[in-house]
Amino acid sequence: MKKDKLSFIISSLSDGGAERQVSILINQLKDKYSIKLFLFHTGIFYKYQNSVKVVYLGKSDSSEFGILKFLKIFILAWRLKKLNSSKITFSFLNRPNYINILAKIYGMKSKVVINERTMPSIQHSNNFKGFINKRLIKLLYKKADIVITNSKGNAEDLTINFNINRVITINNSVDLNEIAIKSKEIVSFRDNAFSFITIGRLDYGKNHLLLLEAMKEINAKLYIIGDGVLKGTIIQKIREYRLSHKVKLLGRKKNPFRYLDKADCFVFSSNYEGFPNVIIEALACGLPVISTDCKSGPREILAPFSKSDYQINGSIELAKYGILTPINDKNKLVEAMNVIIKHKILRDNYSLKGLKRVKRYGSENVIKQYDKIICAVYLV
């Protein structure tokens, strides 16, 4: 017989790191708990099992912005309070977190566990919207029963800059069995040239434009998986830089692992992160990894014995599990990419070490950590 219900709240199950983590969690926990999933948008990219009950708090337009979007969090929180009878309610990302906490303030009996997936002081560093988000985080997050972050850097940011103290770090997970199966599916997309691959939304944070700048000086191919608001700009830059013969946009992919498996190196140019799933997925596919040393996540994964608040500047770092480069530094990114191209022994070494490293992020280990939280709450 299943235990009391668990609820999960996230805007949608469209493509994205947090969405991927929710899909893994609900599919892994479904046999042990009765699960209800609350969504705001209808976009479904990641699959869930039929035993998971989906409830739409409000089928909002994902393009909503401004005062309307702000005001709707209070309406959605009231609906959640009315519809949710679970013992524990997990939420992921800022807006679902606000709604979860507000529902508790309105009288929802469920214990509230929120998940912060990015570094708020960096993500919300600009404009009035950023100011509002930072104020809401300071006011609301401390009212949650438990705050989970996916990296040490994010936890430190909440503690130091937002005075949030009850913080637990649980890294993102990967389903290693699923990756092992899906990575071997046949796909033809590359030729005999050395191939770099990257995955991520086409937005300013991921900084694909830096990769395009680097590719002007690299004798290799680059394959980009993802979609987003900057797609048109990136296509224009590819043409402007005359890179059409060596940079290819592959779009969104349900199974990115079969592409990772056939590439030579994963490269990541982000300006900031929470804890990039794609890096551990690349390691799970046996790829050497080059990443900008952005806050936070890449250093924690690739150089786990260094200080989490350290950032490299002016050089590249041959870390234990991959290469780190300074953020937004085209010359050092070019240097790291050329090092990987020229040194097969280094590539092979990183491939083997990466496969060992990624075992700690297996979904079984992460589920055990969530299970401990669930059990502790049940005993309260």
Image (cartoon, rainbow, N blue to C red):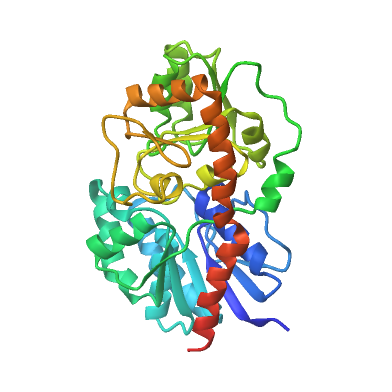
Residue at the extreme right:
186
Q: Is residue 372 above or below residue 109?
A: above
Image coordinates of residue 268 in percent, x first then y, are 45, 35
- Return the residue found at the far bottom: 380
Q: Is residue 340 above or below residue 291?
A: above
Residue 280: percent from left, percent from top: 54, 46
Q: Is residue 2 visible?
A: yes
In the image: residue 201, left or right of residue 355: left
User: Depth check: 351 or 379 in front?
Assistant: 351
266 or 140, which is in the foreground?
Answer: 266
Percent x, y of residue 106: 39, 80
Q: In the shown orientation, is residue 106 left or right of residue 27?
A: left
Q: Quadrant of the N terminus?
A: bottom right
Q: Residue at x 62, y 51 (%)?
A: 44
Rendered residue at 48%/50% (across/down): 62
Q: Nearer the viewer, residue 376 or 285?
A: 285
Going 69% across and 81% down the picture, which residue do you hit? 2
Q: Looking at the image, which residue is at 67% across and 41% down?
A: 255
Q: Is residue 223 visible?
A: no
Where does residue 180 sit, x and y in percent of width and height? 70, 46
Horizontally, residue 138 falls left or right of residue 323, namely left
Q: How many marks?
A: 0
Quadrant position of residue 254: top right
